[in-house]
Image: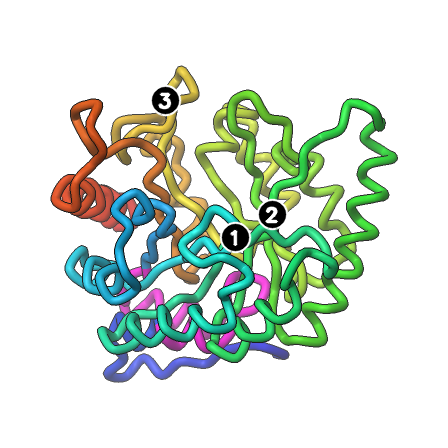
Amino acid sequence: MKNSVTFSTESISRREFALGIARGSVGLAAIGTRALSSIAAEGIPQPIVIFSKAYQPLKMTFDRAAEFTAEAGLDGVDSPVRPDGEIKPENAVEELPMYVEALRKRGLNMPYITTAITSPDSPHAEALLTKAKDLGITRYRLGFMERRDDAGWPKQLAEVRARLKDLAGLNKQLGIGAVLQNHSPSGHAYVGGNLDELAELVEGFDPAQLGIAFDIAHALNVHGPEWRRKLDKLQPHLALVYLKDTNAAKQFVPLGEGLVGATGYFAVLKKLKYRAPISLHIEYSASPSSQPETRAELMQAVRQSLKILKQWLA
């Protein structure tokens, strides 16, 4: 299979598996089913990386961020490389290698990045993606696109798909894949936040060039229990999974305090043989007070999230 990765199940560690995933292909759209089945049979733990937006309030250096990641028991980071991110797009060619090297010194990796890219003409897009590919980063999340009131959905769908077609061409040329997230925060109407719209956006695209990052919390907030049926349509394009929890009031909460644990979601992922790294999102304040969170508070939140997530995965 093109872009597939084959792993020996003899003496392979969790770290080696995570690094192998990062350096090869990511997601259901790219990994051979037989390889995944044998890995699952060996009981190798699911790689878990963190969306390191959570690190930004602490203003950590790359070395400190890598140290925190290792201490927390994670396998790596999904770094925001965007104007408000850990790395600014104009600095990515210089700084991405520094961050990746700090992680690799600790046996960690960066399989994904999160960007503001929405077309090949986005600032610094080609240079950023070329450097990401060189570093073994296999997927990048596209930037958000607001739904426009001045255009009906069919018109905007056609406009966005035209841009995505250009991006898919660039991705094929560079050997990297993009993902669209079903992102639907309160007060915003983002393109693709609705799973039916997301299916229309990615229809006909090669998943290796354009897949989806499925976010169960946003799916629950928008669709309730209908998320499962709608995910079926998106399954061929499922490239990676973002994970956070949400409650009945549609507020993001610590894992285990919301609705996700009772959805049967992880049984679905197991049935789909999803074995790519999960991107853990901490989208709530880890501080019990109104003060900015401390390193110790964030560490506690991450470790508790990992404990709950491993229970769900088991």
In the foreground, 155 or 80: 80
Of tags 2 and 1, which is closer to the observer? 1
The answer to whether 186 appears left or right of 300 in the picture is right
In the foreground, 218 or 166: 166
Q: Which residue is identified by label 2? A: 143
Residue 99 falls in which quadrant of the image? bottom left
The answer to whether 116 appears left or right of 146 in the picture is left
Report the Cα–Cα distance between label 2 and label 1: 9 Å
Which type of secondary structure does the marked residue at label 3 adopt?
loop
Which type of secondary structure does the marked residue at label 1 adopt?
loop
* Residues under numbered marks 2 and 1 in contact, where contact means CB atoms less than 8 Å apart: yes
Residue 208 falls in which quadrant of the image? bottom right
| Numbered range of the magenta stretch | 19-47
**Residue 290 horizontal/vertical position (percent):** 21, 23
> Amino acid type of disc 1?
Arg
**Residue 30 horizontal/vertical position (percent):** 57, 68
Q: Earlier in the sequence, mark 3 or mark 1?
A: 1
Q: Is residue 128 magenta?
A: no
Which mark is drawn over residue 222? none
Q: Which residue is identified by label 3? A: 247
Which mark is drawn over residue 82? 1
Question: Could you tell me which residue is drawn at 67 percent across and 33 percent down?
Answer: 146
Work out whether residue 191 can be spotted.
Answer: yes
Which type of secondary structure does the marked residue at label 2 adopt?
loop
Question: Could you tell me which residue is drawn at 48 percent across and 41 percent down?
Answer: 215
